[in-house]
Image (tube, rainbow, N blue to C red):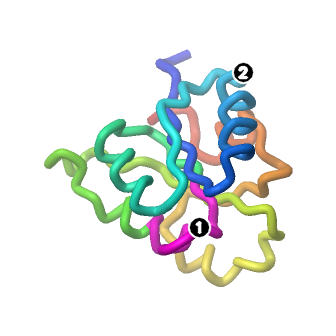
Amino acid sequence: MGPMQRVLIVDDHAAFRSAARQLLQRGGFDVVGEAADGDGALAAVQRLRPDIVLLDVQLPGDDGFRTCERILDLDAGGDASFVPRVVLTSGRSISTFRRQLVDSRAAGFIGKTDLTASGLSALVGGAS
């Protein structure tokens, strides 16, 4: 097994960030940071260079879809080879966002109640 994948959790609810951190750490991920909004997410991605960004769809300010595009458009530290995989999440059903998900460049979607370390691994693959 390779090095642990580094995850940034972005959600405006601290309780979800905490629960997701514990769940993913127990599942073998290295949770390197948290952010509560899109601007915080962008700053954290540039600073922490995570392999995966678990990104809530419903955020204050720029929503998760806009934030996803901003993250994927970053040239983090001048290293064009560095592009994290963005996995969108929501407490709402995927059907609520289906059209936006199809149009987005996200690696996938996991409902908050369905979040597991193995599910996240399956979505993003083993390599970073």
Towards the viewer: 119 or 57: 57
Helix, strand or loop for disc 2 = helix
Residue found 73% across the figure and 55% down from its top: 110
Range shown magenta: 55-68
- Closer to us: mark 2 or mark 1? 1
- The amino acid marked with disc number 1 is Leu
The extreme bottom residue here reads: 99
Does 87 appear above or below 3?
below
Q: Is residue 82 left or right of residue 90?
A: left
Tell me how far mark 2 sits from mark 1, CA to CA: 26 Å
Disc 2 + disc 1, Cβ < 8 Å: no
Residue found 50% across the figure and 74% down from its top: 61
The disc placed on residue 59 is 1
User: x, y percentage for residue 31?
Assistant: 55, 30
Residue found 56% across the figure and 51% down from its top: 10
Query: How crowded is the residue under tag 2: few (<14 C-alpha within 10 Å), some, or many (20+)?
Result: few
Helix, strand or loop for disc 1 = loop
The extreme left residue here reads: 78
Does 106 appear above or below 102?
above
Find disc 2 in the rendering and name its residue: 26
